Amino acid sequence: MGTAALGLRAVPAAAAAPIADGARVPVVVIGTGYGGSVAALRLAQAGVDVHMIEMGMAWDTPGSDGKIFCNTTAPDYRSYWLRTKTKQPLSNFLGFPIDRNIPRYTGILDAEEFGGITVYQGRGVGGGSLVNGGMAVTPRRENFGAVLPSVNADEMYDVYYPRANAGLGVGTVDPAWFDTAACYQYARVGRKHAQRSGFPFVFVPDVYDWDYMAREAAGSVTKSALAGEILYGNNHGKKSLQQTYLARAKATGRVSISPLHRVTSVSPAGGGGYTVVMEQIDTGGGVTATKSVTADRVFFAAGSVGTSKLLVKLKATGALPNLNAEVGKGWGDNGNVMCGRANHMWDPTGPLQSSIPCAGIDNWAAGGAFAEVAPLPTGIETYASFYLSITRNPNRARFSWNAAASRVELDWQTSWKQPSIAMAKTIFDKINVKEGTIYRTDLFGGYKIWGDHLTYHPLGGAVLNKATDDLGRLHGHPGLYVIDGALIPGNTSVNPFVTITALAERNIEKIIAAGL
């Protein structure tokens, strides 16, 4: 289907240079994460020229050490988004704080602090795919109705989940290799403890190149997962969006990307379409230019937090006054909570740990929790098992505009994590009793067992079929769309990026078929 059938102007594909002030383009996509990358690829394949706006860097140029990304154990200027001190999710080790001072820079990981929670987000071309562990989990079919109740589950499981998994390059570790690899001793200890307590232990698909990891273990390629690379990017084996959807999108010749550009306003343009105002920034966060471009259509794909904050601001300030009252509502943390367990000396977890998790403990049906067996890639023996749990937490927060402070705020309360802790305890209390072990209290601050201060999986804020119609079209302003995790109301029961990708595949296919 070409641009004429979609009702869009045909414009030659832009060059690699950043978007020019005053440009007119058929489609602007705000953000380059999962939803935005799917939209850009499918629109380009339909003959539509797309310009993507990305707040973070391109992450395509090595630093002085020859590497694009820095290591988890040695965060430097590349690690955090415009901070002067790291804010690591695991802030202490053996009772000592491990955060360190760093130069202020447009680094890859944003630890965005709200009143009751820190939200970790990827910053750069590829969004969250740059900084997550790559765990590519499709929710159990029986749980899907609670995730996206208005979406046809048969279509998702027959068409869009398979399409997303193929597009992302999802694969599963070879169980035979897993059983012998030194780098997964920590996960085998997690398996033993789970099974001894009667919990199902499951292998979890991932977007890491498992053949590459096997070569890492054999010493025939440069180590990446086995060098602890995860939190601040992975230099070799992980198939981030840069290697999958975005590579295919750019190969069409119809998609261009402007990194280090931050959208500040979207409003109806006098001659039709929308005026998109953005700031170009330098690597210190300073504004170097302000640009105004016009787009026939705009797709919001800045992530759950970025999209929600922008829409709430635009509604409150009158730029998009017709957005409905559902904008900003339905935000959740995917029930994230972390903990560690102190194992006995006869259960070492190994000094070499792959940074890519590949397994989990499933107590979703009985206790409302799914726990990743997560790595602690410190390079030393810790005798510790570490977990990120995803739970059935019912609490939802709302973004709102604080006019006096000219900022968007979130009303999440740390106490709302208590249901998540209770659900995670259905797993780990039982394991501790069975194994005669205890919780670690040295990982999150002074005698603190639970990492209840954060989320890696922000979801919601512009919920499907509420703030938008059932395809992500925003109510009140034709030509505006949401196509990212903001559509999903707070919880997916598993790691969310496959569901975000599959929902984007569904929505963009139907939007294109309807002629935008």
Image: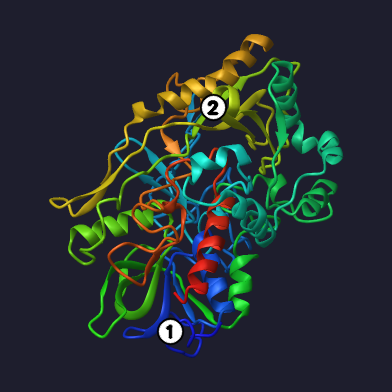
Q: The residue under label 1 is which amino acid type?
A: Leu
Identify the residue at horizontal 32%, vertical 42% (top origin). 114
Please give the residue where the numbered disc 2 appears in the rendered image: 368
Dot 2, crowdedness within 10 Å: few (<14), some or many (≥20)? many
In the rendered image, residue 418, in percent from the top left (x then y), is placed at 41, 23
In the rendered image, residue 143, in percent from the top left (x then y), is placed at 57, 38
Q: Is residue 496 above or below residue 373?
A: below
Residue 36: assigned label: none
Q: Quadrant of the N terminus?
A: bottom right
Identify the residue at horizontal 49%, vertical 39% (top origin). 146
Please give the residue where the numbered disc 1 appears in the rendered image: 8
Dot 1, crowdedness within 10 Å: few (<14), some or many (≥20)? many
Residue at disc 1, secondary structure: loop
Farthest residue, direction left? 404
Identify the residue at horizontal 51%, vertical 51% (top origin). 151
| Snapshot quadrant of residue 176 | top right
Q: Are marks 1 and 2 in contact (CB under 8 Å)?
A: no
Residue at disc 2, secondary structure: loop
Q: Nearer the viewer, residue 191 or 298?
A: 298
In the rendered image, residue 365, in percent from the top left (x then y), is placed at 59, 27
Q: Nearer the viewer, residue 213 or 222?
A: 213
In the rendered image, residue 78, in percent from the top left (x then y), is placed at 50, 56
Q: Is residue 226 visible?
A: yes
Q: Is residue 510 above or below residue 14?
A: above
